[in-house]
Amino acid sequence: MKRSKKITPKRPDWDEYFLKMAYLVAERSTCLRHHVGAVIVRNKRFLTAGYNGAAGGVKDCLALGCLRNEKGIPSGERHEICRAIHAEQNAIIQAGLHGINISGSTIYCTHSPCILCAKMLVNAKIEKFVTAGKYADKSFRPLFKEAGVKYKVISEPKLTITKAD
């Protein structure tokens, strides 16, 4: 009888692990342009998450169509036109709703932040932002630098789940 060789899968490092979680969260997005997910973590422990989509209880872009597409607004501009709340904003809101202190934490997000999210993250005392994707708005960089928020870009994680039976 031939023995089968057991393969031990590579364990993801912490950054890859939590960013992979952000991509999973992004699957709940109701945006027709970008599926964005964010996960907030402190001391290697999950605290909260958010994805981009319309406010709870109101119609979203899946139901109504994309206002930004209809008006020809490029990505990264005129955020106020969009029905969606950004993933980072929703993660912060969820922390507030559930009494979770996110000060001193790291946020893992599928895309880099817009300037509005960056301001909120600075005021929420987020220490580090980790991403693999880029968003059209790059104006967050000087703010993060001045506020001392570390910014790290890693390779997009392999978006498959490995399991051993």
Image: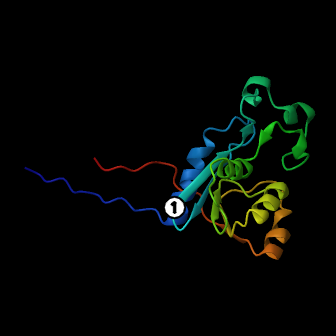
Say left or right for 83 vs 107.
right
**On screen, residue 89 above or below 140:** above
The number of numbered discs placed on residues in the rendered structure image is 1
Circle 1 packing at 10 Å, graded few (<14), some (14-19), many (20+), is: few
Q: Residue at x 76, y 76 (%)?
A: 148
Model colouring: rainbow
Pick out the residue farthest to the top. Answer: 63
- Residue beneath label 1, please? 45
Residue 95 percent across, percent down from the top left: 65, 52
Q: Residue at x 73, y 58 (%)?
A: 112
Q: Residue at x 84, y 69 (%)?
A: 143
Give whichever of 32, 86 is nearer the camera.
86
Residue 120 percent across, percent down from the top left: 79, 58
**Helix, strand or loop under label 1:** strand
**On screen, residue 33 above or below 99:** above
Q: Residue at x 87, y 36 (%)?
A: 68
Residue 14 percent across, percent down from the top left: 50, 65
**On screen, residue 146 above or below 159:** below
- Amino acid type of the residue tagged 1 in the rendering: Arg
Quarter of image, res 52: top right
Residue 59 percent across, percent down from the top left: 76, 26
Give whichever of 123, 110 is nearer the camera.
123
Quarter of image, res 82: top right
Say left or right for 37 vs 77.
left
Pick out the residue farthest to the left. Answer: 1
**On screen, residue 33 above or below 137:** above
